[in-house]
Amino acid sequence: MQLAAHLCGTRVNEVLDGEDTFVSTLSQLGFKRVQINATAVNGVDTSKNATSAQAVAKLISRHKDLEFILQKNEETRPLWEGVLLSNDEYCGDSGKLPPNVTMLVDESKGTRVLSEAWPTPTDGYNIGYAGCIGPASIKSVLEKVPEAGDGREVWVDMESSLRSSKNGTDVFDLDKCYECIDAICSAEQFAHPEFLR
């Protein structure tokens, strides 16, 4: 199992300032991926997005053992575009992301709105797709995303659609995860794992 830390609020504000005390603990805790959710809906001071590309790139360069995921949407454009278009020792060549960075195409910003577009990745970086992907939509999404990927390896991200209220508590719902697995397997995208039958 690969764990992905989804940073929001204060933790993203720290990253935007280049502060990596918290990020430095993630690898030791078993996390291999770090998603930086630099949006207002996630409690982030987005006014920093435009001036933080260099600080974020330096932080990322200090943690080559982690894969960083930048949300790619209009709100985060100043951050991801700043990292992408920089041409220096931390960001690499202009038009390419550092090798341990991918982008998550997510105009919904975790607000449960199904994406209407699945853009083809450019040569400069890998991408994943998000936007209300869950049990009800995974089958149709997986019919469109490989075509959009144009032969490239792509991935999908699900989080808010995999949550439920159980006993009055908001929880990550494994039953919904199993529903997604069943939908993917019934569409013959993958064989059904024997241990989940």
Image (spheres, rainbow, N blue to C red):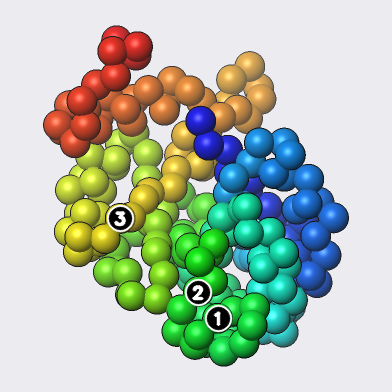
The C terminus: image quadrant: top left
At numbered mark 2, what does the secondary structure look like: helix, strand or loop?
Answer: loop
99 vs 138: above or below? below
Residue annotated with mark 1 = 92
Q: Position of residue 187 (x, y in %)?
A: 15, 33
CA separation in Å, label 1 and label 3: 22 Å
Q: Residues within 10 Å of mark 3 (few under 14, many from 20)?
A: few
Q: Position of residue 89 (x, y in %)?
A: 64, 83
Marks 1 and 2 in Cβ contact (< 8 Å): yes
Q: Depth check: 120 or 43 in front?
A: 120
119 vs 88: above or below? above
CA separation in Å, label 2 and label 3: 16 Å
At numbered mark 1, what does the secondary structure look like: helix, strand or loop?
Answer: loop
Identify the mark nearer the N-term, 2 or 3: 2
Labelled disc at residue 169: none
Q: Amino acid at mark 1?
A: Gly
Describe residue 11's horizontal placement relative to residue 145 as left or right: right
CA separation in Å, label 1 and label 2: 7 Å
Q: Amino acid at mark 2?
A: Leu
Asked if residue 90 shows in the view, the reply is yes
Describe residue 124's horizontal placement relative to residue 83 as left or right: left
Q: In this view, which residue lies farthest toward the left? A: 188
What residue appears at the point 33 percent right and 75 percent down from the top-left corner?
123
Q: Residues within 10 Å of mark 1 (few under 14, many from 20)?
A: some
Q: Nearer the viewer, mark 1 or mark 3?
A: 1
Residue annotated with mark 2 = 97
Residue annotated with mark 3 = 153
What residue appears at the point 42 percent right and 26 percent down from the top-left corner?
176
Describe residue 19's horizontal placement relative to residue 84 as left or right: right
136 vs 98: above or below? above
